[in-house]
Amino acid sequence: MRKETTKQKGTTYEAIFIAEAMKRGLFILEPRGDFLSYDVVVENQHKVLYRVQIKGTSFLQQGKNLTYKIKAVCGNGKNTVTKNDADFLAAYVAPVGAWYHIPTENITSCTVTLRPEVPESKGQYAIWKEAWNVYYKKEK
């Protein structure tokens, strides 16, 4: 069996996001090609559209207890996610099946640090864990 590539993992994370969003009554639009700064557009029941960049990880950070990191911002190319490029970063922590729905305007560093297995986590992005409600607003 061949080792799964980064591209394959990304496709898997996108498929999981789409299935979860649709189960929640959201509509998904997928752009043609993979050259845009977002992976999908989410449309809610109020016809409001959100551009979503989907990223995921399955690797614990070495030396840190129950900490996962996702490269989200900085540099050029595909790792750049800013409020001009997408409305939300949907970050998936695969080993625990946890989603974070972070408004890109709230991302303040190159790397997003997540601790989904720590219930009392006071991390910067903890409030966005399983925050599917961000997609249900009547206005942008």
Image: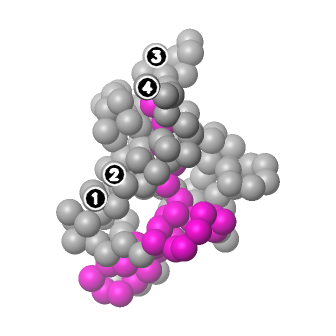
Q: SS at mark 2?
A: helix
Q: Gap in Å between the C-alphas at discs 2 and 3?
A: 26 Å
Q: Gap in Å between the C-alphas at discs 1 and 4?
A: 26 Å
Residue with the mark numbered 2: 16
Q: Position of residue 138 (x, y in %)?
A: 34, 83
- In the rendered structure, the answer to whether residue 81 lies left or right of residue 120 reads right
For marks 3 and 4, the one nearer the N-term is 4
- In the rendered structure, the answer to whether residue 135 lies left or right of residue 85 reads left
**Disc assigned to residue 19:** 1
Q: Gap in Å between the C-alphas at discs 1 and 3?
A: 30 Å
For marks 1 and 3, the one nearer the N-term is 1
Q: Amino acid at mark 2?
A: Ile
Mark 4 or mark 2, which is nearer to you? 4
**Disc assigned to residue 1:** 4
Q: Nearer the viewer, residue 111 or 21?
A: 21
Q: Amino acid at mark 4?
A: Met
